[in-house]
Amino acid sequence: MDARKEREPMKNRTTVERKSERELVVTRTFDAPARIVFEAWTKPDLFKRWWGPKSMGMSLLSCEMDVRVGGGYRLVFSNGMEFFGKYIEVTPHSRLVWTNDEGGDGGPVTTVTFEEKSGKTLLVMHELYPSKEALDAAGTGAAEGMGELFGQLDEFLVTLGASGGQA
Amino acid sequence: MVQYTNANLDASFAALSDVTRRGVLEQLGRAEASITDLADKFNMTLTGMKKHVGVLERAGLVITEKVGRVRTCKIGPHRLQEAMAWLEKYRQLWAERFDELDGVIEELKQQEKFDGRKKRA
């Protein structure tokens, strides 16, 4: 797998930016029309094949997706972790919005837009947290609780965000 | 983001993979401390704590300074690397997912072409 990746150095770049104290934005271009990219995000059997981060030894054990406004989803990973929520906007081939309810009230609302241009699709994934603290907690949690060290986090992420385009 | 190399990140992650070292960082985030203080606080031998501090120092997370007979430790100039590391880790997660997604999309494109040919035929 890795050998294959090395032979294909021209992967499109994934960028991450902290847009504001409550928002994270991930962008990536795909060499396919929006309807195809959208399909891969909305059909469970396709979604299952790419969502589980393989390098972390994770894969999706089950994936239920009722992709319509008010419909729910539930992802179960091989390590037992579960993620669930519901779709609050579904616009075929262009926009998906869902909630992330596994963490209670602190979960973000995720908006994914698919913008087609000359046969390619710019995908923008936007995560809006209910508060600055909730986003900080997500970062702190992921780094296994670095305590007060993360007091410096915000300032730095804002700097990163400001230089995001060039990074 | 660009000024941080993967080697930096690797050293940081390795240094952060130990619960005592994370505790030491957290402690130093509050106040400077000598190696003796830290050894006491974490119930370790002086030698053991020196090793941990050495790892943190090499990763640039901690700097030490000897004044008289006491070596004082404080958070290093690269402490912000962890903050950056989290964002970079997050980016890598998505980059990996999206590289897999490329494969799925490629297959769908091929399938569409194939179906198109079938329809025309």
Image (cartoon, coloured by chain):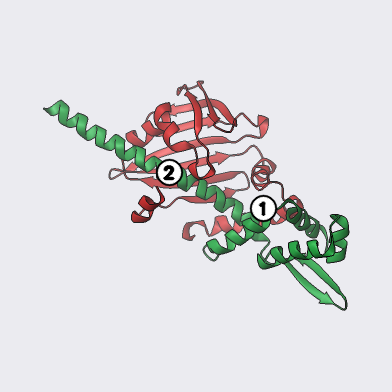
* Residue under pointer 2: B98
Q: Secondary structure at mark 1?
A: loop
The residue under label 1 is B17
State the image coordinates of residue B114 (x, y, percent, origin top left).
20, 32
Query: In the drawing, does residue B82 fall left or right of residue A9?
Result: right
Chain that is red in the image: A
**Quarter of image, res A34:** top left
Residue A45 located left or right of residue B87: left
Q: Colour of chain B?
A: green
Rendered residue at 53%/60% (across/down)? A163
Query: Camera-side residue: B98 or A70?
Result: B98
Element class at badge 2? helix
Q: How many marks?
A: 2
As measured in the structure, the alpha-carbon distance from the residue carrying label 2 to the one carrying label 1 is 27 Å
- Farthest left residue in view: B121
Question: In front here: B92 or A123?
Answer: B92
Considering only vertical position in the picture, is B20 above or below A83? below
Q: Are marks 2 and 1 on the same chain?
A: yes
Instruction: Find residue B111 and report its horizontal and vertical position in percent.
Output: 25, 33
Res. A91 image quadrant:
top left
Contact between labelled residues 1 and 2, with CB atoms less than 8 Å apart: no
